[in-house]
Image (cartoon, rainbow, N blue to C red):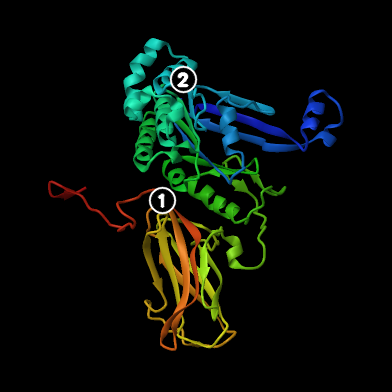
Amino acid sequence: MENEVIIKVDHLDKMYKLYSRQRDRVRDALGLGKKQDLYKEHYALKDVSLEVRRGETVGIIGTNGSGKSTILKIITGVLSPTSGDVEINGRISALLELGAGFNMEFTGLENVYLNGTMNGFSEEEIDEKLDAILDFADIGEFVHQQVKTYSSGMFVRLAFALAINIDPEILVVDEALSVGDVFFQNKCYHKFEEFKKEGRTILFVSHDLSSISKYCDRVILLDHGKKMAEGRPKEIIDMYKKVLVNQTTSAMSGSERVGKDGKLQGSLNRNVKDGLWKSYMTLNPSNDTYGSGLAEIEDFCLIDNSGNMTNTVIKGDTCSVKVKVRFHADISEPIIAVSIKNRMGVEITGTNTMFEKLSTGECKDGDEMTAVFTQRMMLQGGDYLISLGLVGYREGSFTVYHRLYDIFNVQVISSKDTVGYYDMDSEVQLFKNGEEI
């Protein structure tokens, strides 16, 4: 039973017809004209095969448009495939898009009974589960209000409470959990742990790579509708980081294929543009940039411990922020700075060449200088914003030569978080009856 395949997807295709004009859609429906003149074929999924075994927690990751949500909808029966087969061996419960399966005009309570009936339960069976559903949802008297009046947080609470309390053998979850507040998300992930201990199967899509790393036994990477690879979370997350900065091709060459062990075989084709380091990074389009113009921050990047330029770092790994500056005037002892904020704009930490007691000396017009700030990443899992600065004292006055506020983000992937912003990285010993355990 342990190695029983509970979900099998075999050579799955999902093709959509893209019409330039509405009349072409009508002509196609009537069988008039040649298909190449009427529409373009877009494959959301192309020849995707995968297996999920009973008791596994499997994550699916990929960029937007890679086919993640499409494959979940086909597995749960919301969409039909263009070709290929899907086999499900167990009761499946899904939490996909907000509102799926809910009637907006019904109250929350009425939707509980509606969804329970759709999942094959009698009214008496739903009655038995009702207290558990309402306790987990914890939306109080709002359960008697029409769901069209709900906030997105209340909506996802009720939807998730329903999904996990119908005794599913397979739980399928899309990004919907990101809508709830942090306490509800914590509650849901505790339920994930319970499900894993009970030997149930979880299949979920998330952009939260920390959750993927922490909860998944195996991860599948999709890119442009194709399965690139599958394997252990760290290996696949590292590959995904390269996909994010176009360091792998979206379509594998003939020398690359997924082996029987689920790993990518062959060499990766590089598809990296020559030029500035920052071209490899995902940048903030609305960053705040200003300065005197006497010197400028010309280039920058974040480098992980594998030497990749990336916006993603594994907690505990060593990483570097690399900053290149160019001078347009003679400047004495310029200060190069880097700082990190959380998503709420609270400055967490930072340093600069002055704090680090590094003299930058006398810089001439046209000179170039590069600073590399290397550190062990011990921030808790989550998203942070990086700011860069080039400042100094000119003729006795503090001068901002160039400052880039919140210029790029860094996502810290963590399988263990502690209290607060920063991990103390403690080593803990336990003693029982005088003996270390």
Residue corresponding to mark 1: 414
Q: Nearer the viewer, residue 29 or 79?
A: 29
In this rendering, the answer to whether 238 lies above or below 217 is: below
Image mark for residue 52: none
Label 2 element class: helix
Q: How many marks can you see? A: 2
Residue 343 in picture, x, y percent from top left: 42, 54
The amino acid beneath tag 2 is Asn
Image mark for residue 115: 2
**Residue furthest right in the image:** 33
Q: Is residue 371 left or right of residue 28?
A: left
For label 1, count other residues whose C-alpha is less than 10 Å away and answer few (under 14), some (14-19) or many (20+): many
Q: Is residue 131 left or right of residue 268?
A: left
In this orientation, does residue 50 appear?
no
- Residue drawn at x 57%, y 41% as measured from the top left: 262
Q: Nearer the viewer, residue 404 or 194?
A: 404
Residue 93 in picture, x, y percent from top left: 47, 25
In this rendering, the answer to whether 2 lies above or below 233 is: above
Residue 307 in picture, x, y percent from top left: 53, 63
Q: Do residues under tags 1 and 2 come within 8 Å of each other at their CB atoms?
A: no
